[in-house]
Structure formats: structure tokens, C-alpha cells
Amino acid sequence: MSENDDIGDDWAAAMNEQADAEADWGDALKEQANATKGSSQGFAAAEFPEFNDQKSKNSGPSSDEVKLDVILDVPVTVSLEIGRTKINIRNLLQLNQGSVVELDRFAGEPMDVLVNGTLVAHGEVVVVNDKFGIRLTDIISPSERVRKLG
């Protein structure tokens, strides 16, 4: 017998051992799975309820009935915007009392009413008891607000 035949036989024996070991592992895994299913100490698959099932089980309001009571006392910032402009820092530092800053709006054009930075209405300036106020002339619909966000 030559040296090459011995090496070939060794490789063949090693490959046969590996195949036998893989078969043994497969059998062991099958046995373990079968034992787990049959025993009371085995783990059962977790069951999670569907979200749709929870809606029908709860006696709370449906998705159409939104309860706003929980947020009615949350404070929000309402701001009124007459207009905007962009100027460079050099011109900003040169502003002093009596300076005029040109805005992007025309006189008589409605002001923007913003709640937490989101446009919700347009209005015009009024004076009530020596204080400024705003008369709302146009309310932005929720669908329009969502469209402007995107």
C-alpha cells in the first residue's frame, strides 16, 4: 500500500465519522423536541392576543371616539406671526431704535396663528381694552395641516 492510499483512506474515514456525527446530532435534536412536547416542564409557545381582538374586548371608546379629556389641560404656545425676513448678522447688529425691518407680507394681509410652531389659523389684528388681540378669519383644516407637514 502506498502513502497516497493511506491518506485517502484517512480522509474517507474522517468524512464517514463526520456524517455519522451529523446524523447523531439530528437524531438528538429530534428526540429533544419530542421530549419537550410531551413533558410538562417543556416550554410552550407564547401566545399573544391580536390588537384587533383587544379593541373588541375593551369596553372603552371605539377608534372614532377619541377621548380628549387627558390632554385638555396641557399648555401649548400660541404665537402670532406678522411676517418674516432674512437679514445677515452685520445688518442685524446695526439695528437700533427707530430702524425699520421690511417683512415678506403686505399691509392688510392676514397674520398667521401658530400653535407650537404649527400653522392653525389666519387672522387680523384687533384692539380690545387697550390690548392687542386677533380675530380668526380662517381655520386651517386638520387634513391641510398634515399635508403641509409632509
Image: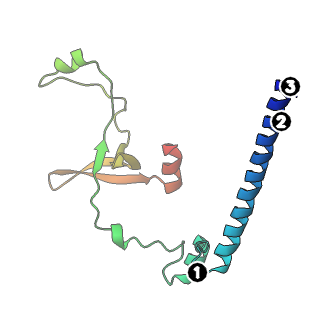
Of circles 2 and 1, the one toward us is 2
Position of residue 73 measured from the top left corner of the image (x, y, whole percent): 28, 67
Position of residue 139 measured from the top left corner of the image (x, y, whole percent): 43, 54
Position of residue 100 measured from the top left corner of the image (x, y, whole percent): 22, 24
Position of residue 146 measured from the top left corner of the image (x, y, whole percent): 51, 50
Residue bearing mark 3:
2
Residue at image coords 29%, 25%: 102
* The N terminus, quarter of image: top right
Residue bearing mark 2:
9
**Name of the residue lying farthest toward the top:** 90
Mark 2–mark 1 Cα distance, whole angstroms, equals 69 Å
Residue 97: quadrant of the picture: top left
Residue bearing mark 1:
56
Tell me whether circle 3 and circle 2 mark residues in contact (CB < 8 Å).
no
Mark 3–mark 2 Cα distance, whole angstroms, equals 11 Å
* Residue type at numbered disc 2: Asp
Which labelled disc corresponds to residue 30? none
* Residue type at numbered disc 3: Ser
Residue at image coords 86%, 25%: 2
Residue at image coords 33%, 31%: 84
